[in-house]
Image: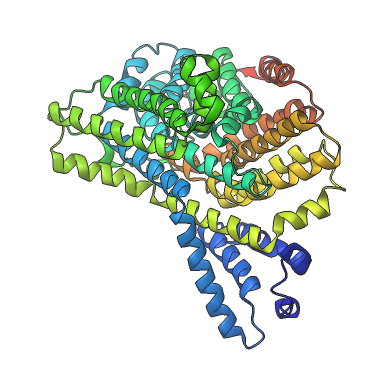
Amino acid sequence: MLLPIIALASDTKDNSTLFGVFTLIPPLVAIVLAFITRNVIFSLFIGIFSGTYMISVSEKNVFISIYYAFVDMSSKMVGSLADSWNAGIVLQVLTIGGMIAVITKMGGPRAIAEKLAKKAKTPASAQLYTWIMGFFIFFDDYANSLVIGPIMKPVTDKLKIAREKLAFIIDATAAPIAGLALISTWVGYELSLIKDAYDSIGQPDINAFGIFVETLPYRFYNILMLAFVFFSAFTLREFGPMYKAAHRAHTKGHVTNPKTDSTLMNQENSFMLPKEGVTYSIYNAIVPIFVLIVVAIVGFYLNGVSALEGEILKAVESNPFSFYAVREAFGAADASVVIFEAALFSSLVAIIMGLKQKIFSLHEALETWVYGVKALVITAVILILAWSLSAVMKEVGTANYLVTLLSESTPQFILPTVIFILGSIISFSTGTSYGTMGILMPLTIPLANAVGIQTGLEDVALHNYIVLNVGAVLTGAIFGDHCSPISDTSILSSMASSCNHMDHISTQLYYAIFVGTVSILCGYLPAAFSVPVTILLPLGLLVIFLVIRFYGKPYLEK
């Protein structure tokens, strides 16, 4: 009812001035609906439609406006997928999904897990090896959960380790590691969001992969959570609800809570399991993953060199293997194309290996690969919707309005913390980190840029400040995902470890909130004051260790 009032000047160039506070409608609709419906796809869809309706609103009647809004929304979705960078991102994500399915069918990840499981003789070593496995299966959080849980469950049960702790270790090494990995099913999505948001502040040629790498030290929650798992496993100390679960399992032998039902969590995806009689080999996972990494690294260099021009190209050709040459080549590379090519080639290698070992027929191999692709179609849908929402917000001027509204009133030191907390709230409500990143990233980078300029930051300091806020988006999404009972990764972790899901969430929540608080107090707050990350990370690690050592209780003691 309110929108037609502002429709008269619809051809005005500055939409942020034209629409004013109404520019916030698309992201607010997406966020509010995410809270209410807990369905990120529906929320993003309606958020996009609300923006296209604002743009298409007509003086004639509502129905014509709705029609044009729907047409505009459809064109934005097609435009998002038609972009060569975006298309490469979608293809790379789907192709890596196919490769993961093939090597899982070959038993490669399971073989790696079994090798490590044989070395676990004590409660501490069993937990530490479970933690280590997360680093081996770094390329996908789903694969991490589905592979590690069934392998380590018999080992941890034998050593009287609570299923809640197994589920926690699996969950805490799934998304945090996938989020830090340079090659994973996450990278393409994050790169696309970063590139798109930098384009909105007039930096279309930014090296998105370089920005991604620069955010790694600022992924405080990811790093500190991984350290928390290590320290608690090494010291065999717990606190909060996890201590009660660990003490129950050790003293009474009840690895699951006898008051809750975990039978529904014993299902496995039979389609992904290797056939009976298949000899597991670690090389069935190591070789394809190694090929993926090597081809990606070589591809980054070759693709980047082909894009260089002028004096930079001459300098690279004169000394092609210098640090300068590698840095410039990687910076100019098209990551979306390179990782897609690497994933496709490694998929072919995995299929050929499986055929040679007679693990499956060509038909079964292709069927498995396609199954893996299908498993990540939901990611492609979220990608397209997130890009479309970003395009709508750009057209109505959401970022410009927020920049004007908040750049003079938001204290520089508080913005990274606000972004981290907001990201965690959205992720908690929706159960997905992907959707959270898609909603927040287009707003965060323009806002951080404006706040930094308003407070007088120089170029280098401004760049670092924006990178810090990007890190806050990416980690806040994972923090909220860890706390959410509707998180797909948490559900998979419960299922894979045969733990009652709410038992898993109730024990993990305590730990996640603690690590999230440390991430703010020892990370995002002081980092906004330009305190070096080389000081903050050791400080955070020290706090984590001291709390576990002196507040945690050794549950093995009677």
Vertical comparison of 496 with 14: above or below: above
Residue 374 horizontal side relative to residue 430, left or right: left
User: From this viewpoint, is residue 65 visible?
Assistant: yes
Quadrant holding the N terminus: bottom right
User: From this viewpoint, is residue 40 visible?
Assistant: no
Residue closest to the eye, 259 or 328: 328
Quadrant holding the C terminus: top right
Q: Quadrant of residue 284?
A: top left
Residue closest to the eye, 451 or 353: 451
Vertical comparison of 46 with 292: above or below: below
Residue displayed at 53% across by 70% down: 72
Residue 483, horizontal then vertical, whole percent: 60, 41
Residue 351, horizontal then vertical, whole percent: 21, 33
Residue 546, horizontal then vertical, whole percent: 70, 15
Residue displayed at 62% across by 36% down: 475
Vertical comparison of 241 with 433: above or below: above
Q: Quadrant of residue 114?
A: top left
In the displayed orientation, state which residue is furthest to the bottom: 60
Residue 92 horizontal side relative to residue 215, left or right: left
Residue displayed at 65% across by 34% down: 471
Residue 548, horizontal then vertical, whole percent: 66, 19
